[in-house]
């Protein structure tokens, strides 16, 4: 068998869709899922593009569900600071997720803040761009998101949570058929939260 390198050649133009310009930013609701709660055997990935997850299901059992991250503020914008950056040092994409949490007290500490610092998670974000493929972005699919910083600022009234992962793919999309079908799947997961 002949050797074939992993890196392919570019297969699309680097341009913009003049009739359908990109809309930046995220909607205010995302889903956070403990990676241990995912039924990995039932995940369906697009046969022609392994960076598209078509279906995602959770294991069954007590306490297994997605958790809602709700960031309704206008300033700072929802999930402001979330980004992906290629690192030539490790040939991976460093992904950063930032969100705000307004909880205080012992319950918030025990149920949210402290578990986030020690778990490994996957997050499904909704973009404001509702074009289909790319409208829902999954962070942590390949290697898991872990907390890198948690800063509580009493003046602003919220915790700034920062989670990171290093993954081989620039982006993993949650997408099946079209935007409407994918949004329905997202809403089904949201309803189980």
Image: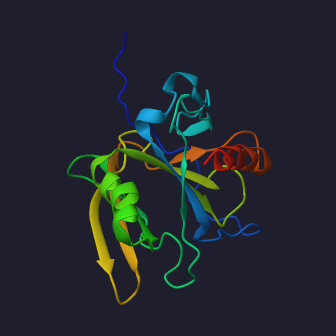
Q: What is the total number of numbered labels drawn onto the structure image?
A: 0
**Which residue is at 58% across, 49% downward?**
12
Q: 172 or 116, which lies in front?
A: 116
Q: Examine the rendered structure and indicate whether residue 100 appears above or below residue 163.
A: below
**Which residue is at 60% across, 63% downward?**
29
At which x and y percent is residue 99? 44, 68
**Which residue is at 75% across, 50% downward?**
179
Q: Quadrant of residue 135?
A: bottom right
Q: 97 or 68, which lies in front?
A: 68
**Which residue is at 29% across, 73% downward?**
151
**What residue occupies the far front of the structure in this picture?**
106
At which x and y percent is residue 7? 38, 37
**What residue occupies the far bottom of the structure in this picture?**
155
**What residue occupies the far top of the structure in this picture?**
1
Q: Examine the rendered structure and indicate whether residue 64 appears above or below residue 119.
A: above
Q: 14 or 154, which lies in front?
A: 154
- Quadrant in which the N terminus appears: top left
Q: Examine the rendered structure and indicate whether residue 29 appears above or below residue 180.
A: below
Q: Quadrant of residue 4?
A: top left
Q: Relative to residue 97, is residue 73 drawn left or right?
A: right
Is residue 129 in view from this perspective? yes
Q: Relative to residue 77, is residue 110 drawn left or right?
A: left
Q: Examine the rendered structure and indicate whether residue 141 appears above or below residue 111.
A: above
Is residue 94 in view from this perspective? no
Display coloring: rainbow
At which x and y percent is residue 152? 31, 76
Q: Relative to residue 85, is residue 185 drawn left or right?
A: right
Q: Quadrant of residue 111?
A: bottom left
Q: Relative to residue 63, is residue 2 drawn left or right?
A: left
At which x and y percent is residue 177? 75, 40
Q: 151 or 141, which lies in front?
A: 151
């Amino acid at each position: 068998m002949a050797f074939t390198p992993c890196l392919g050649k570019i297969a699309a133009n680097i341009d913009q869709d003049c009739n359908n310009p990109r809309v930046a930013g995220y909607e205010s609701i995302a889903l956070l899922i403990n990676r241990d709660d995912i039924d990995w055997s039932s995940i369906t990935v697009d046969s022609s593009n392994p960076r598209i997850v078509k279906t995602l299901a959770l294991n069954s059992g007590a306490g297994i569900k997605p958790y809602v991250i709700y960031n309704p503020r206008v300033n700072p914008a929802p999930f402001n600071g979330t980004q992906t950056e290629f690192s030539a040092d490790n040939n991976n994409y460093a992904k950063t997720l930032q969100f705000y949490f307004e909880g205080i007290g012992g319950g918030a500490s025990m149920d949210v803040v402290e578990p986030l610092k020690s778990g490994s998670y996957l997050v499904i974000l909704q973009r404001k761009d509702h074009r289909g493929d790319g409208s829902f972005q999954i962070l942590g699919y390949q290697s898991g998101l872990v907390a890198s910083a948690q800063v509580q600022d009493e003046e602003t009234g919220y915790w700034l949570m920062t989670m990171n992962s290093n993954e081989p793919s620039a982006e993993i999309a949650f997408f099946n058929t079209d935007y409407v079908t994918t949004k329905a799947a997202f809403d089904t997961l949201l309803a189980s939260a």
